[in-house]
Image (cartoon, grey):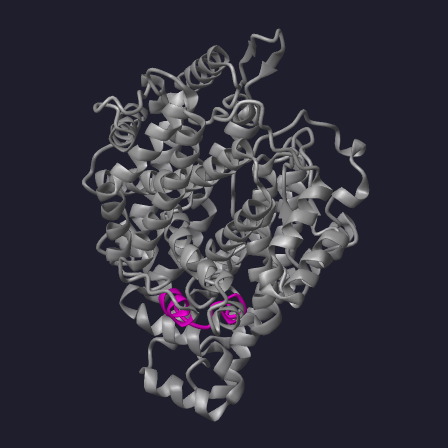
């Protein structure tokens, strides 16, 4: 979870943002069939639902106390500190309440009880945010020099310096008390499109069934599609893709309205707060220049030849005359299936993490032993994976859907990166600066994937297995650098269209998405054939409801590649700088945090180094293929 600064938007204390990665799902079991050691222990948050209810009721009367600070915030350092400490306390309690409800809901999305608990909190804290709407305007009624004087006078205010400084940086985008109250109340409705999308796509949308060439009948839920799109038999893949996306096509108009509703929310908020665009509004909070976003899209488009080289390798390894989009998830090395039980995956990860030192490894082991991880897929469980590090005084949690594949080991390593980032930031930073910026959120996760890949390649000598691992790693470049930027470009285009007054119908969204996919995959150049039904893929991506989030997967990937190389090469001070980075929380702006760690994201160097690494992997793959005469 990422907690937005309370000074910026109180409504955000109940907003949960988790980190997702896709993985294949095995045949699902009932939760009662899973041993306890593979399930979350949520009693670390609250011992029972009754304890949660009691804590919520105890918190309710406390919320009204925010009004007692009105008119006092700029009168003295003591009064300002009292308000900020009160707000931090409310935030911590609200966060615990929310994540207990939301994570219980994720364990079985069919159970409406916990979803109802989430909605109850949203109402409660939306009301609180409205009452607290005076805070930002009141603080901003004086000059920064006054606040700085308060900080010098009262040392306890120092932990709030970054958030206060950030508040003044956005002074021109902060409204008056009445307007801020209205903006706070919009929290009651602004999340509706995402909630409707999640409920419909995860729980209520009918899932088609198909019979594979093996005679097995499978249900093409999101999990089923994720698994069977990688079927080794091409006819099965064709059947899976056509059936799955034709089913989505039936609901094109509805999905279009959902996403349009979400985009309109972004546009409204940006205009109301006097930003030039939705993009600027989204990036402003973390002080990210919009040029970083535009440069990413531009650099990826300039380097599409490297991506097309990857596609040519995929085509060569599959031995097909025409590479199709539906072939991209197919296994490219026959008779090589990298399987790892959960315990085997844990052992491999611990070995891979050795360059990060004993404290890092012992903390990972503690997470394994103390049930920080919910491991296996069960009926009704939310798909994908995430790490939630919002429980400041507790510990992070990881949700998995582990399927005994190498991809699942990689997903576990990825989520452990988030978890360790949260753990060390929470341990090192005071609460107001413990929450790290979203822009750096994916650095620690992809960093761990680099370590895992490096360790695995050290021990593998068989050419077929090496090819499988190298292609898996190369698929990471495709999925994280190119695919996420493809998503980012789509998100940018639809926001720009909405800002021009164009209605985002399902048909418009499909046409826009298909055009971008065709360009990235070289459809017109006959590099990779993209079937028309792929135009509906936008409706499958939940990240489009996270307001310009996905580009950070790509930027983080390029940053982590550089940082991991420095640590693995034993560069002097690299490990110390990295550990300081994952312990820094939000104590500085993300661009500055990365500069201190050794990466400057305002230049093209990280991206250029990443492309060099990608080409080096492709060089090695082609050498093995030439050796094998393929």
Point out the stretch of residues depicted in magenta. Answer: 580-596
Query: Is residue 135 located in the magenta-colored stretch of the structure?
Result: no
Farthest residue toward the bottom? Answer: 153
- Percent position (x, y) of residue 576? 52, 72
Q: Which image quadrant is residue 566 in?
A: bottom left
- Percent position (x, y) of residue 67? 51, 70
Which residue is found at the position 40% from the left and 59% from the top?
562
Which residue is found at the position 40% from the left and 90% from the top?
149
- Percent position (x, y) of residue 205? 52, 22
Which residue is found at the position 29% from the left and 59% from the top?
605
Count of numbered tags: 0
Classify the position of the C terminus by image quarter.
top left
Tell which of 471 and 414 is nearer to you: 471
Q: Is residue 308 left or right of residue 26?
A: left
Q: Considering only vertical position in the picture, is 622 above or below 158? A: above
Q: Is residue 514 left or right of residue 76?
A: left
Q: Considering only vertical position in the picture, is 529 above or below 603? A: above
Tell which of 280 and 468 is nearer to you: 468
- Percent position (x, y) of residue 456? 58, 45
Which residue is found at the position 63% from the left and 50% from the top?
349
Classify the position of the N terminus by image quarter.
bottom right
Q: Considering only vertical position in the picture, is 140 above or below 149? A: above
Q: Is residue 504 left or right of residue 346?
A: left
Farthest residue toward the left? Answer: 500
Q: Which image quadrant is residue 125 in?
A: bottom right
Tell which of 471 and 389 is nearer to you: 471
Q: Is residue 33 left or right of residue 530?
A: right
Tell which of 71 and 528 is nearer to you: 528
Q: Which image quadrant is residue 169 in?
A: bottom left
- Kindly tell me whether residue 278 is visible in this rendering: yes
- Kindly tell me whether residue 119 is visible in this rendering: no
């Amino acid at each position: 979870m990422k907690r937005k600064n309370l000074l910026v938007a109180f409504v955000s204390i109940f907003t949960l943002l988790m980190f997702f990665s896709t993985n294949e799902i095995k045949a699902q079991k009932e939760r009662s069939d899973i041993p306890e050691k593979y399930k979350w222990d949520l009693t670390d948050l609250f011992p029972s639902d009754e304890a949660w209810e009691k804590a919520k009721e105890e918190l309710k009367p406390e919320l009204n106390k925010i009004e007692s600070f009105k008119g006092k915030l700029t009168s003295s350092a003591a009064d300002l500190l009292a308000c900020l400490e009160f707000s931090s306390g409310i935030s911590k309690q609200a966060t615990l309440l929310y994540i207990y409800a939301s994570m219980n809901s994720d364990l079985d999305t069919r159970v409406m009880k916990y979803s109802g608990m989430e909605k109850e909190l949203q109402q409660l804290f939306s009301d609180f945010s409205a009452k607290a709407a005076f805070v930002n305007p009141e603080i901003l009624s004086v000059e920064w020099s006054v606040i700085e004087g308060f900080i010098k006078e009262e040392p306890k205010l120092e932990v709030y310096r970054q958030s206060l400084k950030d508040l003044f940086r956005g002074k021109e985008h902060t409204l008056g008390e009445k307007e801020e109250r209205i903006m706070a109340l919009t929290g009651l409705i602004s999340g509706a499109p995402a909630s409707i999308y999640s409920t419909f796509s995860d729980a209520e949308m009918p899932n088609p069934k198909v019979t594979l060439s093996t005679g097995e009948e499978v249900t093409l839920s999101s999990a089923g599609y994720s698994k069977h799109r990688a079927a080794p038999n091409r006819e099965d893949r064709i059947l899976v893709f056509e059936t799955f996306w034709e089913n989505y096509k039936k609901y094109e108009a509805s999905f279009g309205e959902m996403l349009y509703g979400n985009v309109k929310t972004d546009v409204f908020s940006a205009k109301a707060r006097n930003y030039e665009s939705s993009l600027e509004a989204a990036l402003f909070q973390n002080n990210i220049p919009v040029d970083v976003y535009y440069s990413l899209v531009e650099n990826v488009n300039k380097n599409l030849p490297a991506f097309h080289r990857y596609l040519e390798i995929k085509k060569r390894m599959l031995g097909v005359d025409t590479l199709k989009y539906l072939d991209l998830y197919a296994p490219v090395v026959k008779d090589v299936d990298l399987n790892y039980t959960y315990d085997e995956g844990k052992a491999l990860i611990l070995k891979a993490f050795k360059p990060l030192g004993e404290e890092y490894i012992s903390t990972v082991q503690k997470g394994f032993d103390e049930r920080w991880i919910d491991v296996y897929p069960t009926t009704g469980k939310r798909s994908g994976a995430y790490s939630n590090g919002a429980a400041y005084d507790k510990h992070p949690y990881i949700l998995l859907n582990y399927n005994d594949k190498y991809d699942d080991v990689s997903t576990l390593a990825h989520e452990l990166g988030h978890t360790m980032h949260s753990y060390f930031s929470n341990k090192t930073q005071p609460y107001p600066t413990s929450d790290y910026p979203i822009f750096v959120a994916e650095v620690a996760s992809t960093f761990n994937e680099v370590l895992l890949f490096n360790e695995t390649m050290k021990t593998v000598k068989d050419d077929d297995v090496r090819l499988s691992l190298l292609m898996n790693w190369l698929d990471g470049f495709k999925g994280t650098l190119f695919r996420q930027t493809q998503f980012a470009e789509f998100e940018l285009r639809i926001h720009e269209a909405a800002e021009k007054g164009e209605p985002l119908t399902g048909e418009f969204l499909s046409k826009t998405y298909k055009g971008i996919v065709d360009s990235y995959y070289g459809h017109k150049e006959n590099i990779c054939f993209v079937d028309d039904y792929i135009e509906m893929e936008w409706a499958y991506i939940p990240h489009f409801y996270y307001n310009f989030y996905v580009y950070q997967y790509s930027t983080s990937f390029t940053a982590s590649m550089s940082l991991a190389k420095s640590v693995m090469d034993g560069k002097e001070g690299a490990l110390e700088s990295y550990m300081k980075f994952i312990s820094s929380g939000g104590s500085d702006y993300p661009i500055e945090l990365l500069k201190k760690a050794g990466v400057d994201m305002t230049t093209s160097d990280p991206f250029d180094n990443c492309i060099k690494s990608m080409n080096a992997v492709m060089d090695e793959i082609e050498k093995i293929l030439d050796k094998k005469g393929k």
